[in-house]
Image (cartoon, helix red, strand yellow):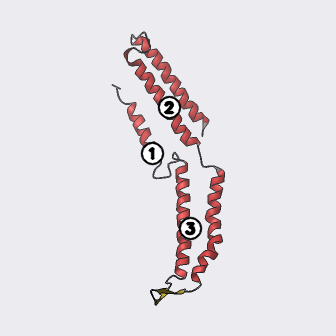
């Protein structure tokens, strides 16, 4: 989301392309496709495409309306559904059923516990889904288990600078 960072990356790509253009005549290659120059150009193009794909993931975010809907659902739904869950507490329902001439007494075994269970289960499920949405929002903030570990990448890039140095 920082334009200066994107400009630095694009400037690095431009610098890399300029170095590739300088390398071709110095290595004795007259045409762009000679000696693996086209392969280097393909690699540069692939890097730029992958950077754009990562940037599009970074720049896209959950719409504000969806976030507000989820917020309202989490806070208002338990209040609105309380009468439904409360009907479980109205006592046990006795039902008699006539099966082949015999009357069988069926007693409901659900009571207030089922209402409390439904309320807590609904709230926990909706809260868990909201937390998943928030965690998946920004894979670059470094706060989640599935986020990109920039420290590992930086250590590898620092290590790459040491190769070939005598």
For marks 1 and 2, give the CA distance: 21 Å
Query: Camera-side residue: 98 or 65?
Result: 98
Question: How far across and how far down the image is residue 80, in percent?
Answer: 65, 70
Look at the image and tell me in which quarter the C terminus lies: top left
For marks 2 and 3, give the CA distance: 42 Å
Question: In percent of the image, x 44 and y 24: which residue is there?
Answer: 42
Residue beneath disc 1: 149
Disc 1 or 2, which lies upstream in sequence? 2
Question: How far across and how far down the image is residue 115, in percent?
Answer: 56, 77
Q: Identify the element where label 3 is drawn.
A: helix
For marks 3 and 1, give the CA distance: 32 Å
Residue beneath disc 2: 49
Q: Residues within 10 Å of mark 1 (few under 14, many from 20)?
A: some
Q: Toward which corner of the image does residue 75 lie, by quadrant?
A: bottom right
Horizontal relation, residue 75 to residue 111: left or right = right
Numbered tag placed on residue 128 in the rendering: none
Disc 3 or 1, which lies upstream in sequence? 3
Q: Are marks 3 and 1 in contact (CB under 8 Å)?
A: no
Query: Camera-side residue: 29 or 105?
Result: 105
Question: In percent of the image, x 56 and y 39: which residue is there?
Answer: 56
Q: Nearer the viewer, mark 3 or mark 1?
A: 3
- Residue 142, above or below 32: below
Q: Identify the element where label 1 is drawn.
A: loop
Residue beneath disc 3: 123
- Residue 87, above or below 37: below
Question: In percent of the image, x 54 and y 47: which residue is there?
Answer: 138
Q: Are marks 1 and 2 in contact (CB under 8 Å)?
A: no
């Amino acid at each position: 989301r920082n334009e200066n960072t994107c400009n630095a990356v694009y400037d690095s790509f431009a610098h890399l392309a300029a170095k590739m253009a300088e390398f071709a005549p110095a290595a004795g290659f007259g045409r762009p496709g000679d000696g693996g120059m086209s392969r280097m150009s393909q690699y540069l193009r692939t890097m730029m495409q992958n950077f754009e794909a990562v940037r599009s993931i970074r720049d896209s975010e959950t719409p504000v309306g969806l976030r507000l809907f989820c917020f309202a659902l989490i806070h208002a739904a338990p209040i609105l559904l309380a009468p439904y869950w409360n009907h479980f507490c109205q006592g046990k329902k006795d039902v008699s059923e006539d099966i082949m001439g015999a009357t069988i007494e069926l007693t409901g075994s659900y009571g207030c516990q089922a209402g409390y269970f439904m309320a807590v289960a609904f709230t926990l499920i909706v809260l868990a889904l909201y937390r998943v949405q928030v965690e998946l929002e920004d894979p670059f903030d470094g706060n989640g288990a599935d986020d990109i570990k920039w420290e590992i990448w930086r250590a590898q890039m620092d290590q790459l600078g040491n190769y070939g140095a005598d």
